[in-house]
Structures are given as structure tokens and as C-alpha cells.
Image (spheres, rainbow, N blue to C red):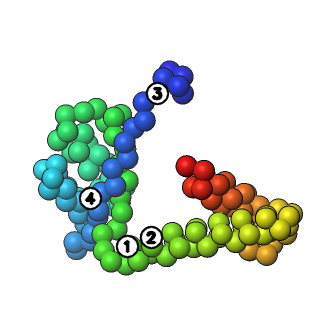
Amino acid sequence: MSEAGRELVPVVTVPVHRHGRLWVVELPADGVWTCGRSLDQARERSHAALALAREIGLDQVTVRVRLDGPEMDALEQARERERAALAAAVVRLRSQAVPWPEVARLLQVSQREARQAFAEASATTAG
């Protein structure tokens, strides 16, 4: 099937927490409770259980696991602040006609990361 004909598959992020030697997944809204000895096993089992609970095929949903807890919330917020600060710095330097290699060197990132931050900042302001 071509890219244009492909439907977007929703990504469901499932919270996991440690209970003894197991990773536990609880999705009460979908009636899903499962676990695994590894994160991969917990993800695979929650993927199968979620597809079964929603009466859809495995190929109609993607599951990713996320550690449940305030530490992960704080980490995600810090990463978002870092992305925003990087984008602002790249935009400022590029508005001063600073070449990409120097932008990357000054901000201690690769040129690819600098260009990506610029593109994301441009997309945010455009739409």
C-alpha cells in the first residue's frame, strides 16, 4: 500500500509501574490489566489486551510504555522547556545570519538538531 493510502495508526501510551519483579500495566477505562517481566513483554501484552478490549486488530493501534510517576512528568516538562529554549536560540542566531555550523557549535548540538529545532519553531509559528 502506498504512503498516501495508509491510515494513521493511533499511538496509545500506557503507564507502567514496578511491582516486585513485574512491570504492571493498568488501563481501567479499557478493562485492561496485565504485566510482564520485561518492559517489552508488558508492552506486547498490553498491546494484545488493548486490541482485544477495543475489538480491533493489532495493526490498528501502537502501544508505547511510559513510567508512571511524578518524576516522568517532571522530566517530560524539562525536555519540553529545553526544546523550546533550543528553538528560540536557533531562531535568534539564524535571524542574525549566523551560519549553521556556528549555530550548532555555539549551542552544543549537531547541525541536524539545530535545523530540526528551527523547523519545529517555524512550523509552530506558521500554524
**Mark nearer the N terminus (3 vs 1):** 3
| Residue 13: mark | none
Mark 3 neighbour class, 10 Å CA radius: few under 14, some 14 to 19, many 20 or more: few
Residue sitting at 34 percent across and 40 percent down? 61
Tell me, yes or no, whether the two marked residues, 2 and 1, touch with CB atoms within 8 Å.
yes
Q: Amino acid at mark 4?
A: Gly
- Using the numbered discs, state the Cα–Cα distance from disc 3 to disc 4 in whole angstroms: 31 Å
- Using the numbered discs, state the Cα–Cα distance from disc 2 to disc 1 in whole angstroms: 5 Å
State the residue position of label 2: 76
Q: Position of residue 77 (x, y in %)?
A: 45, 73
- Using the numbered discs, state the Cα–Cα distance from disc 3 to disc 1 in whole angstroms: 32 Å
- Using the numbered discs, state the Cα–Cα distance from disc 4 to disc 2 in whole angstroms: 25 Å
| Residue 6: mark | 3
- Using the numbered discs, state the Cα–Cα distance from disc 4 to disc 1 in whole angstroms: 23 Å
Mark 2 neighbour class, 10 Å CA radius: few under 14, some 14 to 19, many 20 or more: few
Label 1 secondary element: helix
Res 100 visible = yes
Nearest to viewer (mark 4 / mark 1): 1
Q: Amino acid at mark 3?
A: Arg
Res 37 visible = no
Judge by depth and name the residue closer to the eye, 10 or 23. 10
Question: In the rendered image, which quarter is residue 21 located in?
Answer: bottom left
Q: Amino acid at mark 1?
A: Asp
Residue sitting at 37 percent across and 73 percent down? 73
Q: Amino acid at mark 2?
A: Glu
- Using the numbered discs, state the Cα–Cα distance from disc 2 to disc 3 in whole angstroms: 30 Å
Residue sitting at 30 percent across and 74 percent down? 69
**Mark nearer the N terminus (4 vs 1):** 4
- Extreme residue in the front direction: 126
| Residue 36: mark | 4
Q: Position of residue 90 (x, y in %)?
A: 72, 67
**Mark nearer the N terminus (3 vs 4):** 3
